[in-house]
Amino acid sequence: MSLLRTGPQLAIDTRARRLQGFDGPEALGNLESRTTWFGPADFTPDRPGSEVAVQAISGLIEVNGRDQAMPRRLGLEVASVAAGLLAAQGDMAVAIAARRGRPVGPAHTSVLQAGLLLLSHYFVVATGLGDAVPGPALPAPGPPFRSADGSWFEIETLDAEPWKEFWTRLGMGDADLGRAWTVFRWRYERATCSLVPGLHEATARLPLAELRRIAAASDVSLTPLRGYSDVLAEPGLGAAHPSMRSVDDGGGGAVGRDRPPVAPVGPGLPLAGVRVVEATSRIQGPFAGMLLRMLGAEVTRVQPPEGDYGRAALCLHRGKESVRLDLSSGAGRAELVNLVADADVFLHNWRPGKAAEWGLDFADLAPRHPRLVYATTSGWGDMPEARHLVGTDFLVQAYAGAGNALHPPNEPAFPSRLILGDLFGGLVGAEAALTGLYRRERSGGAWEARSSLLVGAMALQAHVLENIVGRKEIGRQQGRPVWGVLDRPVVTRDGMLVLSVDDDESFRRACELCGLDPAGGTRAATEARLAARLGEGTAAGWETLLLDAGVAAAVVCQDLAAVPADPHLSKLFEPVGIGGLAPRSPWSFG
């Protein structure tokens, strides 16, 4: 496996080693997958890359900064970690194909493709839906909120009535709540949320304990923003991979009927011939199903009679077959059982207890289908301490402490408005299904694979927490990024620029390019002079000069719709049926 390393960032091979570790001493084989910075983007092959450059080019910095109307770097290495997950999943899919008699070539992916993939439904909004998704229209910041005793917290509800009741109990009038609810609800599609000032004033009058009581009485979920000391002190929270069990819970796979042999085929996608039935909604589950589809699986999506939540999220269903079933009825559930009987994977993200209530749990289906991979994606997984909370993105980010790694110490440790929990929850959901398929092909039997938003959030920041525990932090302080002036986007005459000068050689090259002596003062003072010099020129002009000097640099995208229009990047996108453009599959094989 060809590896791409990113300095203090997560090494691309970390996730692959963990996936292999699921299988005990047996590895996946001699895989020859390749991960690069930019993949098939139409850049020069020797262009130097970095996490921050990918964030700038892909639009991650633009989307992350929408609440402040200013591009903002993400302190977590989101694109690099996502690329590590995708590389490992490509390897798993190739290994599955080999065991099924369908050999395909090694997997190729890139950090840029991973970064683009994380913005899939935001691209659809930017390039197609436009005003169909309401934008910000109110004057005050959105969540999180602050209590009278100084605690920051997130709230969540999926329905308007609990929202109204919570704020009414805090003394708010109806006139403000309707507009605020619309903006609050659409923050998942816009990555921004502004509210009326009165909401923040209302929470600031009461202590956290009283706000918790009112939230519980209103059926609204509330959780404080936690620090890493809280996260690391909680037993069991450090797991950053899905959990697996066989039908007999023995860990070796139940002995079921053998699958008929599959005739070898020529090169193609590794999951060709794998059938998936997906009964999911919102972002996390559909994203996991889309990844399986991109790997070649035939995915049949089950949706309710009234359709799915969110037009923008429909881009995650492209390429899937569709059937509408009323699962609240016995007839609808019987139809689902018939669909699953012909499937290799059943994927759902129903609320806890719903599958058992409907007679569609793993224990119900596995005896009828002894080679089924039963994959669930939930909010909180096996964390009973949080099961009273609705399992949605921003609550999970707050509970997992993600804001600590996203922002330097002089900024509030707020979650990102990017739906990082949903996105990485979807990535580990696909990982869980692939792990189940690989174990089935290796050992036989039916397998249950459980993943969650919380597991996804922990996978995203596993390298940060591991380094805190191991006292090996580089560029961080208790998990928080320590940034100088050049670690943030630099303002130039006509836009913003990022550059990577973490190592001494890159710093020397950048200084000499700008006519500065790298040893002519303290590092901080020299960086300030370098930033001032860059500010005198244009972003594109400096990008060209820095790249020619071997320094990773990029103009910061400030309009997401311009990314697929860029001739260097256009072939990485495809049209979607609801309008707009979305990133293509991040993998190629062979």
Image: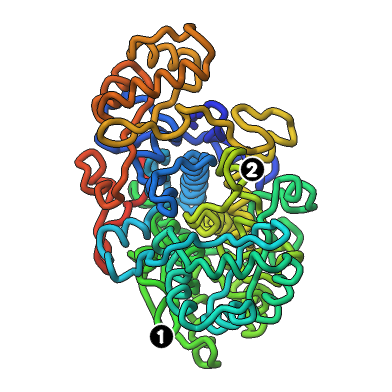
Identify the residue under disc 1.
306
Q: Secondary structure at mark 1?
A: loop
Give amino acid for label 2: Ala
Q: Position of residue 515 (x, y in %)?
A: 34, 10
Q: Is residue 92 above or below residue 389?
A: above
Left or right, 472 with respect to 341, comes to right
- Residue 298 pos. (x, y %): 40, 65
Q: Position of residue 485 (x, y in %)?
A: 47, 28
* Mark 1 or mark 2, earlier in chain: 1
The quadrant in which residue 248 appears is: bottom right
The way the protein has been coloured in the rendering is: rainbow
Above-or-below relation of 246 to 92: below
Q: Which mark is residue 462?
A: 2
Quadrant into which the C terminus falls: top left
In three-dimensional space, the C-alpha distance between marks 1 and 2, rounded to whole angstroms, equals 39 Å
What residue is rendered at 33% in x and 65% in y? 319
| Whether residue 525 can be seen here | yes
The amino acid pointed to by label 1 is Glu
For label 2, the SS is helix
Q: Judge the density around disc 1: few (<14), some (14-19), many (≥20) Cα neighbours within 10 Å.
A: few
Residue 25 drawn at (x, y percent): 69, 40
Which sits in the foreground, 385 or 445? 385
x 70%, y 77%: residue: 214
Q: Is residue 371 visible?
A: no
Depicted 388 relative to depicted 126: above or below: below
The residue drawn where x is 29% and y is 26% is 543
Say few, some or many: other residues with alpha carbon within 10 Å of mark 2 (under 14 / 14 to 19 / 20 or more).
some
Residue 304 occupies quadrant = bottom left
